[in-house]
Amino acid sequence: MENQSSDLLQSALDDLLQEDFKRFKDKLSHSDFEGKGTIPRGRLENADRTDMKNLLMAFYGAAAAVDVTIDVFTQISFREAAAKLREEREKDYQKKYRDHIQEEYQVIEDRNARLGEHVSLDKRYTELLIVKEHRQREEREHEIITRGRRHAELMAQRTSHTKISVLFDPDRSRQSPRTVVLQGAAGIGKTMTARKIMLDWAAGKLYQKKFDYVFYINCRKINLFTEQKSVADLLLDNCPNRKGPIKEMFEKPEKLLFIIDGFDELSSLLDIDEVGLCTDPFENKPVKTVLCSLLRKKVLQKSFLLITTRPTALEKLQQNLKFPCYAEIMGFSGEERKEYFHKFFCDEKKATQAFNFVKENEMLFTMCFVPIVCWIICTVMKQQMEKGEDLSQTSKTTTSVYLLFLSTLLTDHFANSMQQSKTTLWNLCSLAADGILEQKILFEEGDLKKHNLSLCKIQSLFLNKNIFQKDTECESVYSFIHLSFQEFFAALFYMLEENEEKMKKSFSSKKDVNNLLKIYGPSKNNYLMVTVRFLFGLLNKERLNDMEKKLHCKTSSEIKLDLLKWFEVEAKKISSLPYKTYEELRDQLELFHCLYESQEEEFVKSAMDNFQEIRLEHIRLTTMDEIALSFCVKNCCSKQSLYLCNCTLGIGEREEGWITKLRKWLFPLNPLMKDPRTSTAYTLLQGLKDPNCKLKTISLSSCKLSSAFPEDLSRKTLFTNWSLEKLDLSANTLGDLGLKHLCEGLKHPLCKLQILLLWQCRLTAACCGDLSEALSANESLTELELSGNELGDSGIKLLCKGLKHPSCKLQKLVVWDCHLTDACCGDLSSLLSTNWSLRELNLSGNNLSYSGLKLLCEGLKHPNCKLEKLDLSEIHIDEKTTKKLEVLQKIKPGLSIVHNAASSHQNPGTKTRRMECLLSKRHTFICRLMSWSSEMMWNIFVMHCQEVGLVLLLSIATYWLHWLIKGHMED
């Protein structure tokens, strides 16, 4: 500061002519500036300009020396020199002020920051969605109830988006608003936005020509002031060393912007008589009077105001403002949520991993429109990643994140009065529960009064105020910032205990969780689904203890038993259904989500005992579905069975580029084209390999599993799970590599698997060597199904080597439609003459003739052959072969031979089996045909992306082909 004043004085004195400099010295010798006395005349007479500068600074001080010089210039009518010095000083101070603001606002501290830790505001701040328009009631309702991606899309579709940079731009009437109110819910980013405005202005990025000075006033700090202050004092609180050219600032009030942050946080909202307000910016008054004077434009009328507040304080604020302009912070859109994750993690890979995980959880992704929730989720995930934990296994449930949100806001705003606030919190929860039962999301003032809510303190954190036009008037209604928050508070209502007097008043009948479950049960009302899920989430002991500690609230322990009883009834009801509709399958899955939310393993084990089998068919499982299922599966301890048939696993709602979206739009009918990725079902595997998992049967047929799936399954599950008896991985693209991984598990001495089904898994002869080795080592396997794989004669030759081994105890081998010819019959004959355990052999659908079957009969006649059933369906049997088989039948009367020539003697079960084989074969052909046609068309598009018309024409052809084939199959 001293150097800057020295340079300014030197420059101003150097500009004076010699005669003017004499006049200046003469006038200075008679000037008593602010009672500080005069510099002795003798010291002034011989002083040159540099001496004069030094005398002024030594006598008056650096800052006052400039004021004295300006005052003397004015007295001797050197107005231009005085104005120039004043202007230069102000420019100099503005730079100093901007530097100070940049230093003050460039970093922020996270709420959980350790000593010395801070984050750059520029690097963390993510642009928020701000709108200016007033919404209609229906629009607001739609915003409240929409979830997931649709919620993000809905926010992005708002037509009146605006930016901070244009808030003070002229409106349609060409008038620039002098007061702008920026409203938004708690945690939506109001304070962060206010601080970013300060930083951007100081850095020269915002409002450069508009404002010379921008000042920040924090209403929470205003509450702490007890002494009287003036407007000048509030300004100086922003200035370095609380010093600055205040008079010059006040001379241009139109170049000043006051940011008043958190109006709603004032301990008593402003209700001050007009007479008591101040008009002089230097007049001392109670701080709230000074603030009210600024708001009502009684002082510095031409200055600009930017006020942030929660919607609940808007009505009181409106009474203190003149012609304000309103804007609302809506939160993060979908893209902005993604941007926040990347800024938080500062690591592309980790950010993408975390964001993708959250995006697949509809509830968490919806919550992320609130910045503070984004921060909570990112913080928790970052800690997990640093510990090397798997997000899908250890990530916080939705309930735990909502509890963190609740405790974070309450700790921030009511750390010293939490005990007194718990009754208000209970009332807020009762309002939420009432609304959920009545399917009500917008509340009138009467509803708030009914629940003893007065729109102060805690409820203003979680309720939004909405003003809608109704006929010739306006109506005020209130809502939670999103339906999911209302559902959370409703669930909390059933968990919190209140004193007996409060319970007797009006809520005892409604606080019956069995009544809630009764309403939810019969119809599976969607409007109660999330509330019930939260109820299970609040059962967790750790969360309950944490909640009691942080919120000082007692929780009910009886509800746990009520929920378990309800779950038992629902589980048995679903399990008893012989056939489940799609809705019933989703209901079953929802029960698993409820258990996952609880994260109480003992509770889940008791609940899962009610399922003897878990069966899900023709359903697409999101990643969250798979996580919930995995958690429940690992707590199946009673030898249950898991059947997943034709389900899509482990893919979820990943991010998609425009090419992927176009691909799905052009070819929606082909499941392979919808999502060409295969799955490792990684998350489900974490449950299957858990030591607690005691499943007896695992069936994952037609689930788009890849060759990578058995790698983890074989090493972990088959080795350790003694209870697993049957594994069905049919109709998945495991390939030879996948079978190789599987064989590693089969060879392990602890493997107790009895039945392995692998039909249509794209296996070839190349895998038969590994399978042969596994059969030689495994003593538990009794049934092996390999139908529909192109094993060929060479593959069967290798397989027979393993089957001949004394350790092999296989009793049933099915190699239907495995591209076998007469060339393999010698190996099979040799096998039959040496193997003592094989009881059933299915060779249906292969290209065998008389010569091959003749060789086979030689082995069947052998005394060592113990075969009881031979299936030769779908093989051409001529008269010569028939006679050969009849001879065999006489030699081996205990052997049942099934073949086409004997079709008249077949029982209905055999015919059904033949029909299933035919249909399966035709279905495989049709699927491959449609997949091939769609892939071909897509490749044409990639090579000729300009010729979109051709693609559209071919896509129509695909639809036509699908319709034709579908019609043929139905016939």
Image (tube, rainbow, N blue to C red):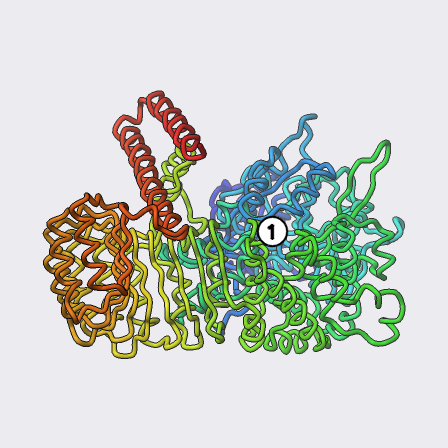
The residue that label 1 is drawn on is 194
Name the residue type under label 1: Ala
Task: Please tell me which residue is depicted at 17% across the width and 48% down the height of the picture.
Answer: 881
Q: At which x and y percent is residue 678?
A: 33, 50
Q: At which x and y percent is residue 445?
A: 85, 51
585 with respect to 74 (left or right): left
Which one is nearer the viewer's eye here, 81 or 267? 267
Q: Is residue 266 visible?
A: yes
Task: Please tell me which residue is depicted at 55% across the width and 73% down the height of the picture.
Answer: 609
Disc 1 crowd rating (10 Å Cα; few below 14, some 14-19, many 20+) is many
Q: At which x and y percent is residue 13?
A: 50, 47
- Label 1: state its secondary structure: helix
Q: Is residue 45 visible?
A: no
410 with respect to 474 (left or right): left
Residue 657 higher or lower than 110, as above or below: above
Q: Quadrant of residue 550?
A: bottom right
Task: Please tell me which residue is depicted at 47% across the width and 46% down the height of the picture.
Answer: 11
Which one is nearer the viewer's eye here, 139 or 678? 678
Q: At which x and y percent is residue 201?
A: 54, 46
Which one is nearer the viewer's eye here, 758 or 26? 758
Which one is nearer the viewer's eye here, 214 or 490? 490
